[in-house]
Image (tube, rainbow, N blue to C red):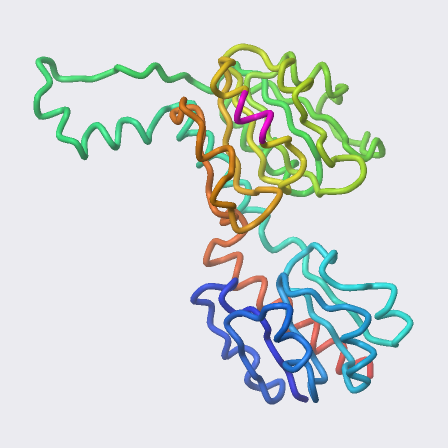
Amino acid sequence: MKIVLLDALTLGDSDLSVFDHLGELTVFQTTDEQQTAERLVGQEVVITNKVLITAQHMADNPQLKLICIAATGTNNVDLEAAEKAGITVKNVSGYSTESVSQATFSLLFQLIHQSRYYDQYIAKKGWCDSPVFTHIERPFYELKGKRWGIIGMGTIGQRVAELATAFGCDVCYYSTSGKNSQQSIEQVNLATLLSDCDVISIHAPLNAQTENLIAAEQIQQLKAGAVIMNLGRGGIIDEQAMATALDTQDIYHGTDVLAVEPMLLNHPYLSVKASQRLVVTPHTAWASVEARQCLLEKVVENIKSYVAAN
């Protein structure tokens, strides 16, 4: 088989030799909109993380048989066109549960424990000049006894709930689909979650139910000192409203995702004055070494299963 990987750079330093025994592999680090068409010519299998595969691409490449999405989301592939063209589309799920759950706590500790401030204090040799043995300029707080609200109780949300419970948190959740009611954890409405919880983490997809779910009105409902984190998708939180609130409310925000990625040069988060209330990471939560290895193994299995069935 002729296989093309369109955006290998999104996989970091992952070992791509796992594909060697499957066929003739062509690897591109990045692929822009103008390059996609020419790079699909003659290929039977395409592996894409975020590169868009359109109906026109499929029509122009009748030899294309399989589209492997190296991610869970499928919004970068025209699924209806693929079905009509007889092209199989396979995505990957369940590979990043531990990575995203761990990243949730990484964001949280930077905010609730102010670890970034204390690291910078040391780097600037502030402790060397301290008149006493300790320095507790920035207050930090324990998780035990805090109310933790989870928005989106899928596999990742459930794992975060387990970890939060282990820290002694009282956990509740809001179902963005309205269909999830089988958890042993307390289910509440969104307004209750926002107003009651000390820590809120979002683990939901971006869809009609979640787009702009946390806008200015909802941000106003957050309790004083609350930490809200987005480990789901950009677009769930109104970023302009959040940037404004960080400078006017006693709240904290951590996010690994933005509505437009990569981050825009004029993004409102870059102008937040109360920078100690904000931590942004560049969509890395999914990408531990172990998660990327698991992801590639699942892509390989998707290709193998397709071959076995055809």
Extreme residue in the front direction: 266
Q: In this view, does 181 lie to the left or right of 154?
A: right
At a point 70% along the width and 78% down the height, the residue shown is: 304
Which quarter shows the N terminus?
bottom right
**Along the viewing direction, whichever of 202 and 251 lies nearer the viewer:** 251
Q: Residue 301: give x, y in percent of width and height.
A: 67, 72
At a point 84% along the width and 70% down the height, the residue shown is: 82
At a point 78% along the width and 83% down the height, the residue shown is: 61
Q: Is residue 113 left or right of residue 73?
A: left
Is the magenta region chiefly helix, strand or loop? helix
Q: Residue 177: give x, y in percent of width and height.
A: 81, 35
Q: Residue 141: give x, y in percent of width and height.
A: 41, 16
Q: Residue 283: give x, y in percent of width and height.
A: 52, 48
Q: Is residue 118 left or right of residue 309?
A: left
Number of numbered discs visible in the structure rendering: 0
The quarter holding residue 5 reads bottom right
Q: In this view, does 51 lie above or below 214?
A: below
Q: Is residue 165 above or below residue 261?
A: above
**Along the viewing direction, whichever of 74 and 101 lies nearer the viewer:** 74
The quarter holding residue 232 reads top right
At a point 30% along the width and 27% down the height, the residue shown is: 117
Q: Is residue 179 left or right of residue 265?
A: right
Which quarter shows the C terminus?
bottom right
Give the residues drawn in magenta, as a range.
Answer: 240-244
